[in-house]
Image: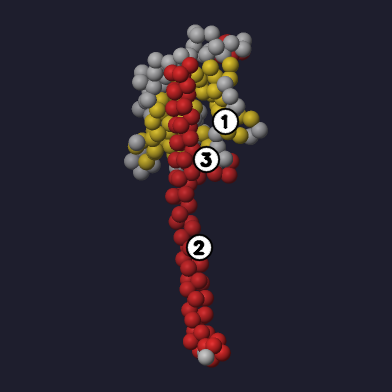
Amino acid sequence: MASRLANSPERGAALIDILTTLAILSVTAASAVPQMQPWVAELHAGHEARRIWQWMVAAQTDASRRGRAVGLEWTERDGRLWGVVVVDGNGNGISQADIDAGLDVSAGADVPMFDPASGVSVGIHSRVRAIDDAGWLEAGSDPIRFGRSDRVTFTPDGRATPGTVYVSGRQGSQYAVRVSGTSGRVQILRYEHSSGDWVW
């Protein structure tokens, strides 16, 4: 019985069916990859925007716990963007002069912002409407906008430096992490290119 099944036409037909199905699945998967690329790019950019959001919320919590201002800065090193946490060391807020004098000091290790392979960066890769005013930001504009500084500071009473960090990914995906000054609220927004609006 076993030898008859092994050599039967039915077994050969079943093998052909399996191979045909695998070939169809391979072709379908290959054709779907280009259509998924914008979705994957959006996913990566959104993930990195959430990481910045988490970093800022952690700094808020740290400022409240310490009873001192805590600042976040961005710096480029070895072709990669790093986040630096700075703590007010003398109780008068964070300033570049106090950082240079060693009074306001970094706390903990620097944080790598992005995986270079993800294609995500702090940047503005295409023209978008500015969040802070009614104007537009051109591609290549400064993506870290906290007044004249690249530093956002959170105070123990819940206030913060108002401003925005713009995060861009492949395929034109654009996010922003927005900090409100009075409330210290941190929000993630996504840019809709079709309407020119930022959405929550």
Residue 87 position, x and y percent, is 53, 17
Q: Secondary structure at mark 3?
A: loop
Q: Which residue is mark 3?
A: 120
Tag 1 and tag 3, C-beta contact below 8 Å:
no
The numbered dot on residue 189 is none
Dot 1 or dot 2: first in sequence order is 2
Q: Which circle marks residue 111 in the picture?
A: 1
Q: Is residue 7 visible?
A: no
Q: Residue at 51% across / 67% down in the picture?
A: 26
Q: Residues within 10 Å of mark 1 (few under 14, many from 20)?
A: few
Q: Amino acid under label 2?
A: Ala
Q: Secondary structure at mark 1?
A: strand
Classed neighbour count for the residue bearing mark 2: other residues with Cα under 10 Å, few (<14), some (14–19), many (≥20): few
Q: CA distance from mark 2 to mark 3?
A: 24 Å
Q: Say what amino acid the circle numbered 3 marks.
A: Val
SS for dot 2: helix
Tell me which amino acid carries mark 1.
Answer: Val
Give the left or right position of residue 136, taking residue 9 as reference: left
- Picture coordinates of residue 112 (x, y %)? 58, 33
